[in-house]
Image: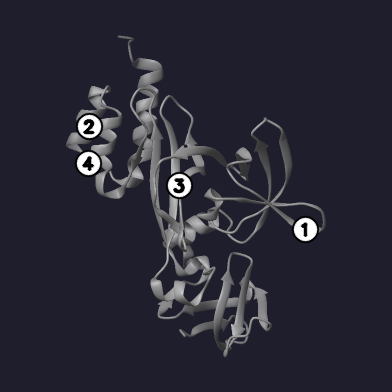
Amino acid sequence: MAQDIIVLRESEEIIKCKIIEINDTIVSYSLLPVSENEIVTVARFTVESYSIGKRSALKKQDQNESNDDGILYKYKAGEIRKGFIVFVNGDTLFGRIKIRDIAFNQIQVMWLVENDSIVIYTPKELKSYGYDLINYQVVDIDYKKEITAGIKCSGKLFLEHLDQGAARLYQFVRIIYPKSVLMEYSQPPVYYGSVEIEYYIIPPVKEPRVVQKKSVRGSLIRLFEDHDALVEEMINNRPRMEDVPSVVSKYNYWYENVRTSK
């Protein structure tokens, strides 16, 4: 079993352990040999640094240099947030949502009720939900890929809605874990994985399409071929995955303000 290490800030004590959970609030670990009945939880600010197996983690002040850490911070992995859920019939509830991680956000909602017990909602019961400034909508996506830790997507998912223009843009996220981690954990800590982002676009005319890293330009040209100037721009300057939201925004502005009906 891989050995993790935590370095405490004030005492500089080095603790050899198995890290169970890390987020922006707490660090939970079990001393070696691992015992599920002896899990220690400390405040995140008391930890100077940590390493997971052979992977060294950044200090708190340096985490903005890591794309994965920045994404996990934005989506408040492991926290409880004020939010809302909208049922299929349109009824809306406001309350608290427990966030597991950015990938599981697409599969289920953990809704807190009395006594902090949790009710699980899936895309079958809801049509949207959200917390902070993050809004998820149910999308029927015909795309079978592993989302996280052996869970594959099929059919309806909660996808974050990024652009509500003529071409609707959704973000699809996967967390990929090494096989060695999956062998050790049934629910691996999110910091063991790497985040992979793709986009799902529903254009006003063409069929919906998933934009993957290996085919960004080709997918965007097929989706937006009615916008000649934008197509020429993408031919001359190959867009990358991080450019997808801006390309969609340009198309939507053109479609809604410049395009002439044919």
Which amino acid does the dot numbered 3 rest on? Ser
Asked which secondary structure carries label 4, the reply is loop
Q: Earlier in the sequence, mark 3 or mark 2?
A: 3
Residue found at the very far right of the displayed protein: 115
Image spot of residue 175 (x, y percent):
44, 59
Above or below 149: residue 121: above
Of marks 3 and 2, the one in the foreground:
3
Residue bearing mark 4: 238
Seen in the picture, residue 110 relative to 216 is either above or below; the reply is below
> CB under 8 Å between callouts 1 and 2?
no
Q: Dividing the image into 4 quarters, which one contains the C terminus?
A: top left
Q: Residue 29: x, y in percent?
A: 60, 79
Report helix, strand or loop for mark 1. helix
**Where 146 falls versus 171 (above or below)?**
below
Mark pair 4, 3: CA separation = 31 Å
First of labels 3, 1 by sequence position: 1
Which tag, 1 or 4, sits closer to the chain's start? Answer: 1
Q: Quadrant of residue 143?
A: top left
Amino acid found under the numbered disc labelled 4? Arg
Q: Which residue is mark 1?
A: 116
Residue mark closest to the camera, 1 vs 2:
1
- Can you give x and y, in whole percent of width and height, for residue 168 in the image? 44, 31
Q: Quadrant of residue 87 in the image?
A: top right
Residue 154 marker: 3
